[in-house]
Amino acid sequence: MVDVGQGDGMFIRSPDGHIMVVDTGFKGRGRALVSELRSRGIRKIDLLVLSHPHADHIGGAIHFVKGFEVGEIWMSGAPSSTRVHRRLLEAIKEAEIPTKIVRSGDQRSLGSEVELHVLAPEEPLLRGTRSDANANSVVLWVQHGSVDFLLTGDAEKETEQRVLEVLRARPPPDFEVLKVAHHGSRYSSSKPFLTRVKPKLALISCGRRNRYRHPAPETIQRLEEIGATIFRTDLHGTFSVHSNGQNFWTRD
């Protein structure tokens, strides 16, 4: 998870070297994610996931579309008429990158050892929420052996309710690592959701002294009550989580 300020930007590298980037921060701060990848010699991205069309998640995507070889893009398909979204779609079309609007139930492999399962959004898309774009974020279950990651975009409480229904239908193990939704805001990370997911490690991407005052104290309290260890980019900067398929550990 790269410190991109008040936004989300992270990547996963599978044991056999396949790369997935999940969100890219604002355009300016997205360069930090680009620099992190290039410093590791990464020039090709197998999958770019853009959880929803807000600028703090897709603004930096233009750097990847124009500066990397991108195999495929996954998007939520939530409607947006913003300039940054329009320009990104134009750049994707010009680069001829295969793009998929994903829904709950979609899945694919990231190399030979990592499996990706889409848990949200699902049809019909959520409407009339506090933020429909947030509520219809792409939610991913990333499975590496017995270590499970849950990446939630800017999911809202309504999203979490739907995800819980999916998990009840085909329950996976508890999730070891949770990318906390919406920068730790009070609009998600509900008690029923956290009680079911029970992450041992909670990752929060947010900017230092951000004007939204993320993460919310009540969200931090709920995470602490379930015993999660919390890592935050505003406090810890860029950090990484490593997995061997049986155990996981952190490094900053």
Image (tube, rainbow, N blue to C red):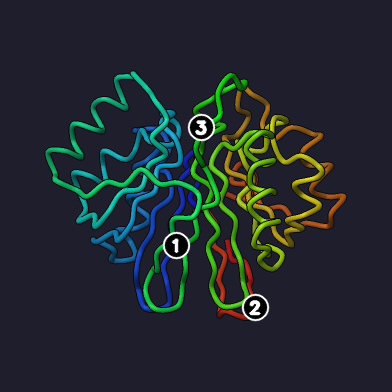
Residue 129 in picture, x, y percent from top left: 61, 22
Residue 5 in picture, x, y percent from top left: 51, 37
Which label number is shown at residue 96?
Answer: none
- Residue at the image point whose x is 75% and y is 46% from the top: 193
Q: Quadrant of residue 148?
A: bottom right
- Residue at the image point whose x is 44% and y is 55% from the top: 106
Distance between the Cα atoms at labels 3 and 1?
A: 27 Å
Distance between the Cα atoms at labels 2 and 1?
A: 16 Å
Mark before the other along the chain sequence, 3 or 1: 1
Residue behind mark 3:
125
Q: Classify mark 1: helix, strand or loop.
A: strand
Which label number is shown at residue 247?
Answer: 2
User: Is 206 located above or below residue 139 in the figure?
Assistant: above
Q: Amino acid at mark 2?
A: Asn
Residue 231 in picture, x, y percent from top left: 67, 52
Q: Nearer the viewer, mark 3 or mark 1?
A: 3
Residue behind mark 1:
12
- Residue at the image point whose x is 64% and y is 46% from the top: 180
